[in-house]
Image (cartoon, rainbow, N blue to C red):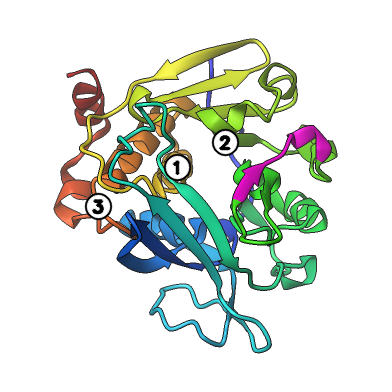
Amino acid sequence: MVTSPRPPSGGDVLIVGNYCHDVLIQDSTVKAESLGGAASFISNVFNGMSIPCTLVSKVGDDFRYPVSHPPIVSPDAKTTVFHAYFDSGSQPGGTNNRPDRILKRICACDAINPTDLPNSRFAFGMAIGVGGELLPETLEKMIEICDLVFVDVQALIRDFDRVDGTVRLVKLRETGFYRLLPRIGVLKASSEEAAFVELEEVRKWCCVVVTSGKEGCGLYWRDGNTKVSPFLASQRDPTGAGDSYLGGFVAGLVQGLAVPDAALLGNFFGALTVEQIGLPKFSPSVLQVRSLPDLFLDAIA
């Protein structure tokens, strides 16, 4: 049975990853532009649930978004930019043998170095880079200053075409992060990313969470696994759904939930996110009235 990790002894949550500028393009037409990056989606969840956090993010001097957690400005760099390409034939969830999107990194801001991290102790750490900004030595520093570290595998296995920035995935074993897996607490991957992780091997070292969109998510550890039910959602934009999931998952653990219950909360935030375009807005009334039993009833309805 999965239980909550041991109660951490430190303070709040440390989030490490760059803010981005996201451009959504459908059939060659720009449909939306918004603040992006896992850092924005996760901090958005934490803000909605009034959970304090410390965020380390780098942007260029062109960054103009108002954010509750100010980033480090790199004066000689530009903010990371992603273009997400959709077409009218693609179906939510990547059905009809088409992916949800083609993602391209147009511009990349500076990497986050170990010296950029605060000299403090944290209960939870979240390594959530999206554009190649997370370095192995930075993750190692996070492991040293955080009681429990959550890692989104996209921070570890994304590679970028040198010509047009198209995102592709590489095997986790081939990266400089692989040696650190026995020292992290939880590794999160989408069902697509899981194929690059070697799940059966990695689950021996840490808990692995695999998100599967409308199918919910699965939790895998050395001695077993469990599935967590999804929430029905009408998908408009899948961008950031996995990030909001991870934010909800960690928020649940911060509040003392058992791991499966925290994963259910993650599914809830993921479902809310896909129903909106860009960075979602979480209605205070929805977040305040929802109790965990309510979420269970919705998930099995």
Where is 67 relative to 224, above or below? below
Q: Is residue 200 above or below residue 185?
A: above
- Tell me which amino acid carries mark 1: Gly
Residue 204 picture location, percent across and down = 73, 19
- Say if residue 186 shows up in the picture: yes
The answer to whether the residues at label 1 and label 2 have Cβ atoms under 8 Å apart is yes
- How far apart, in angstroms, are the residues tagged by discs 2 and 3? 23 Å
Image-based side of 42 in relation to 206, left or right:
left
Magenta stretch: give its range: 167-174
Say which residue appears at 85% left-offset and 37% top-offset.
179
Instruction: Between label 2 and label 3, give the one nearer the viewer.
Output: 3
User: In the rendered view, would you say 296 is above or below 8?
Assistant: above
In x, y percent, where is residue 203?
A: 68, 21
Q: Secondary structure at mark 3?
A: loop
Give the CA separation, mark 3 to mark 1: 14 Å
- Front-lying residue, 222 or 190: 190
Q: Which quadrant of the structure image shows residue 279?
A: bottom left
Q: Amino acid at mark 2?
A: Lys
Q: How far across and down, in percent of the image, does residue 153 sit?
A: 63, 41
Query: What residue does disc 3 label?
Result: 276
Q: Which residue is mark 1?
A: 242
**Residue under the image location 65 percent in, 10 percent down:** 223
Residue 263 in picture, x, y percent from top left = 43, 31
Q: Earlier in the sequence, mark 1 or mark 2?
A: 2
Is 45 left, or right, of 137 in this rendering?
Answer: left
Q: In the figure, residue 120 lies in which quadrant?
A: bottom right
**Disc 2 on helix, strand or loop?**
strand
Residue matched to label 2: 188
